[in-house]
Image (cartoon, rainbow, N blue to C red):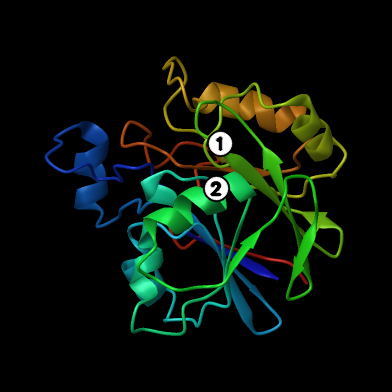
């Protein structure tokens, strides 16, 4: 199995349009960017997306235009699902998998695009191309965000999506018991910032340690996060499991 970070940015992306901050200048000078967060999983010749970001067209071109066999959605924020429309007239629109509340919201918005809908309750594992996935609740309300536990040969690689540190205990216990090899964790801002719907860097580190992750990469990072921050994921970073 191989997982590629197609994007590691927040809803705005980095560089931020019209921003002259030090981080945006540095990213521009280096010719680098953070597209909106999504993951590409490759296994046994199949390709599965976790999130379909607004940057999906550019992301798939960067990844050499793989045929996508399935898409998973964590929640109904536009930066996590709205790029699904990019499949129109490009390939057969792939089936989508999401918790029922998330599927209802996203499919209503995408009413113009026929596709297979697979609502899957949280904490109920399901299999795609030999890879077990499990949606797990995170926080906060009022919208309904979920993380995803990805497993391969008993090698877990969870993705938290948008969340605060105080995720439900059932999800925390699931992660603690998973013996996490690699965690993709929400870290929207440097330590010291308080963002209501997300973890900052210090909170993300504490969360990763609490659930026992052997290694972790920060995702969903805003333009405030410097590109050389330890454990910061970067676009097109790839991880392989035998």
Indicate the quadrant containing the C terminus: top left, top right, bottom left or bottom right.
Answer: bottom right
- Where residue 118 appears, as percent x and y from the top left, is 64, 63
Mark pair 1, 2: CA separation: 7 Å
| 236 vs 203: above or below | below
Q: Which residue sits at x=84%, y=44%? A: 178
Q: Which residue sits at x=39%, y=71%? A: 113
Residue 129 falls in image quadrant: bottom right
Residue of label 2: 102
Residue 211 vs residue 144: left or right?
right
Residue 98's disc is none
**Classed neighbour count for the residue bearing mark 2: other residues with Cα under 10 Å, few (<14), some (14–19), many (≥20):** many
Q: Which residue sits at x=47%, y=26%? A: 197
| 165 vs 242: above or below | above
**Classed neighbour count for the residue bearing mark 1: other residues with Cα under 10 Å, few (<14), some (14–19), many (≥20):** some
Q: Are marks 1 and 2 in contact (CB under 8 Å)?
A: yes
Q: Is residue 133 visible?
A: yes
Q: Which residue sits at x=34%, y=42%? A: 11
Q: Earlier in the sequence, mark 1 or mark 2?
A: 2
- Where residue 20 appears, as percent x and y from the top left, is 14, 35
- Label 1 element class: loop
Residue 32 falls in image quadrant: bottom left
Residue 144's disc is 1
């Amino acid at each position: 199995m191989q997982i590629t970070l197609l994007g590691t940015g927040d809803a705005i992306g980095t560089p931020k349009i019209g921003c002259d901050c030090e981080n945006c200048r540095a990213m521009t000078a280096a010719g680098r960017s953070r597209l909106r967060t999504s993951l590409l999983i490759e296994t046994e010749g199949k390709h599965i997306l976790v999130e379909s970001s607004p940057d999906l067209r550019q992301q798939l071109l960067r990844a050499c235009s793989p045929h996508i066999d399935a898409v998973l959605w964590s929640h109904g924020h536009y930066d996590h699902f709205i790029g699904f429309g990019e499949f129109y007239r490009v390939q057969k629109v792939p089936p989508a998998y999401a918790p029922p509340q998330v599927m209802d919201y996203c499919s209503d918005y995408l009413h113009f695009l026929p596709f297979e809908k697979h609502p899957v309750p949280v904490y109920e594992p399901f299999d795609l191309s030999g890879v077990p996935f499990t949606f797990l609740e995170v926080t906060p309300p009022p919208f309904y965000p979920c993380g995803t536990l990805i497993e391969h040969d008993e090698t877990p690689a969870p993705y938290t999506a948008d969340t605060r540190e105080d995720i439900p205990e059932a999800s925390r216990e699931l992660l603690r018991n998973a013996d996490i090899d690699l965690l993709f964790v929400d870290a929207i801002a440097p330590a010291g910032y308080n963002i209501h719907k997300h973890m900052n860097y210090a909170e993300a580190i504490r969360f990763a340690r609490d659930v026992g992750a052997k290694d972790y990469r920060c995702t969903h990072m805003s333009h405030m996060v410097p590109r050389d921050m330890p454990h910061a994921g970067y676009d097109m970073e790839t991880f392989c499991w035998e």
